[in-house]
């Protein structure tokens, strides 16, 4: 997929200064207008009252004034450490949660949904029953869901075990079933959360190539991960999220490299601090 | 989500939950009738053998009230926690929040069908006759279903907002067990005005009494009263659906973060 028309790397004005700020390139607005924005987040913030008063007077701020656009057919990566709000961002895009402030616009008639592993799996039920239920929860009718079953059985390579209870599966078999049922989601915007780290090497490769064929087939995808190389390989554009804010947004290679560099520096700094403390 | 697809999904969730439940226990589906049978056995032991109750048919009287009440108590207790227990799904898919209590209600509808069949068998075995009056069970069960659905939706919402409501539902169900004329006959109160007052104020008491009137005494229930209960809880149900539809994302946040 071409990245020619992507808005270039930029950082938002009120962010903490990082090494990245030297590389700021302002996007050409004319280029962005050409493409259909499937989904747009406008100054979106999300906070909630936690029971424990450990946050700001009990209020936990998850996202803080996040703005971004998702264009038709692109694969947008969201990268950042654990707990920076990546999953919450996907939940907002999927319409599961509503923002406390700001707006989430989705293009009329378009649907967004999370690609989720092991949706409501019940260990006592067979792989077949779980697959049927998962497909229905993802919006298929019972008839459609039943028609998916042979292909799920085939792709997951479960054979006759498909009819055995999931509790008797190995973790690899579970992962295969989970990924395959998740792949049955058919929506305009596919939101993927850390999905490709499943199963053994052989199946991981198969899963990755299935994902890639979706992406090259024109599917609009938002892909969340903390595995930098995977994001670089699969995405056109990347958003770097830190402490609930957009730290950088732009072409995948540039943002991922900056992120990797940042993580490396942070690790070295932590090690040095540790040496000073213990020395 | 289209209504038909919603109903099918809730129904599939219910069937799968039942199948998983049956697979978990050695006796499987037998538990559906074994549990009510054990209740009846305990009633027999306590009231017939130990207390030597002088009232005729007291065991059948108790069994009818208790086994009809079980539908309400089990469903509402379980449905109260349904959204919170389903937060694994809530965080992943955008579905109507009513789906979770709805699946629970559907699940216990299937279980209760077995209980009602067993209750009828118990009555027939004891010499009671199945008459045309039993047709009144159809509107009665329908109204009871609407009441259970409305209470389940309210409970599921409240527990989402504060987990404390789960404790209150458990207590509330226990209080209703004693207040709804299961162990005592509302019609045997010394003052008829008091009887009417209890029947008017406690719809559950009216419904349980109606089961006895139909199945034991061959008497149709007060249909106007029954229709009023149906309309009242039907309206509550509609309001709850609107609230849960409008506040779905709020409930999801509450279920995920509290």
Image (cartoon, rainbow, N blue to C red):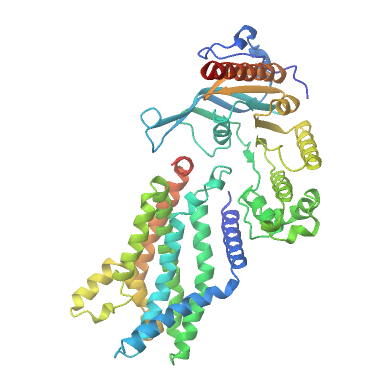
Q: Position of residue A38 (x, y in %)?
A: 64, 29
Q: Is residue B237 above or below residue A15?
A: below
Residue A208 appears in which quarter of the rendering? top right
- Return the residue nearer the eye: B197 or B176: B176
Location of residue B28 by image quarter: bottom right
The spot of residue A102 in percent (x, y) is 48, 26
In x, y percent, where is residue A21? Answer: 60, 9
Residue sitting nearer the eye, A121 or B249: A121
Residue B60, visible in the rendered structure? no
Image height check: is A200 above or below B223?
above
Q: Position of residue A44 (x, y in %)?
A: 50, 26
**Figure quadrant of the N terminus of chain A:** top right
Q: Is residue B132 among the parts visible in the rendering?
A: yes
Indicate left or right for B247 with B223 as reference.
right
Count of numbered labels shown in the rendering: 0
- Residue drawn 68% across the image and 38% down it: A195
Side of B53 where B194 appears, left or right: left
Nearest to the observer: residue B196 or residue B170: B170
Which sits in the foreground, B188 or B210?
Answer: B188
Decide: is B220 above or below A180: below
Q: Which quarter of the rendering shows the C terminus of chain A?
A: top right
* The image quarter in which residue B213 lies: bottom left
Q: Is residue A52 above or below residue A184?
A: above
């Amino acid at each position: 997929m071409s990245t020619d028309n992507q808005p270039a790397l930029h950082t938002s004005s009120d962010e903490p200064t990082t090494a990245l700020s030297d590389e700021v390139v302002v996007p050409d607005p004319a280029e962005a207008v050409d493409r259909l924005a499937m989904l747009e987040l406008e100054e979106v913030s999300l906070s909630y009252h936690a029971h424990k008063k450990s946050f700001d007077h009990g209020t936990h701020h998850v996202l803080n004034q996040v703005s971004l656009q998702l264009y038709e057919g692109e694969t947008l990566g969201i990268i950042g450490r654990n707990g920076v709000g990546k999953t919450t961002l996907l939940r907002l895009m999927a319409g599961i949660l509503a923002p406390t402030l700001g707006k989430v616009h989705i293009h009329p008639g378009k649907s967004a949904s999370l690609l989720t592993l092991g949706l409501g799996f019940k260990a006592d039920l067979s792989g077949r029953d779980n697959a049927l239920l998962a497909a229905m929860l993802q919006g298929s009718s019972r008839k459609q869901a039943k028609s998916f079953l042979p292909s799920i059985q085939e792709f997951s390579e479960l054979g006759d075990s498909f009819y055995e209870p999931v509790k008797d599966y190995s973790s690899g078999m579970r992962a295969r079933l989970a990924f395959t049922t998740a792949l049955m989601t058919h929506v305009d915007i596919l939101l993927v959360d850390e999905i490709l780290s499943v199963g053994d090497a052989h199946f991981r490769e198969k899963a990755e190539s299935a994902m890639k064929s979706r992406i090259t087939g024109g599917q609009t995808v938002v892909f969340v991960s903390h595995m930098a190389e995977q994001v670089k390989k699969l995405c056109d554009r990347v958003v770097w999220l830190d402490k609930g804010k957009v730290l950088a947004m732009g072409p995948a290679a540039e943002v991922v490299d900056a992120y990797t560099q940042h993580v490396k520096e942070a690790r070295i700094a932590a090690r040095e601090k540790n040496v000073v403390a213990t020395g | 989500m289209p209504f038909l697809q919603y109903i099918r999904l809730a129904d599939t969730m219910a069937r799968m939950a039942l199948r998983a439940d049956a697979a978990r226990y050695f006796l499987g589906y037998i538990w559906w009738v074994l549990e009510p049978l054990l209740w009846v056995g305990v009633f027999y032991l306590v009231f017939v053998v130990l207390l030597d109750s002088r009232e005729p048919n007291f065991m059948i009287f108790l069994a009818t009230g208790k086994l009809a009440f079980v539908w309400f108590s089990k469903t509402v207790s379980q449905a109260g926690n349904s959204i919170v227990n389903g937060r694994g799904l809530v965080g992943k898919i955008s579905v109507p929040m009513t789906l979770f209590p709805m699946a629970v209600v559907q699940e216990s509808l299937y279980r209760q069908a077995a209980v009602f069949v067993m209750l009828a068998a118990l009555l027939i075995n004891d010499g009671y006759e199945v008459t045309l009056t039993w047709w009144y069970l159809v509107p009665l069960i329908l109204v009871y279903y609407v009441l259970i659905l409305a209470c389940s939706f309210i409970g599921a919402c409240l527990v989402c907002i504060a987990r404390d409501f789960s404790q209150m539902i458990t207590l509330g169900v226990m209080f209703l067990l004693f207040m709804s004329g299961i162990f005592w006959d509302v019609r045997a109160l010394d003052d008829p005005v008091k009887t009417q007052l209890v029947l008017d104020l406690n719809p559950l008491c009216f419904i349980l009494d109606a089961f006895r009137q139909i199945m034991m005494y061959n008497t149709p229930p007060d249909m106007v009263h029954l229709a009023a209960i149906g309309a009242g809880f039907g309206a509550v149900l509609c309001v709850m659906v609107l609230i849960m539809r409008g506040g779905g994302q709020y409930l999801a946040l509450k279920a995920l973060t509290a």
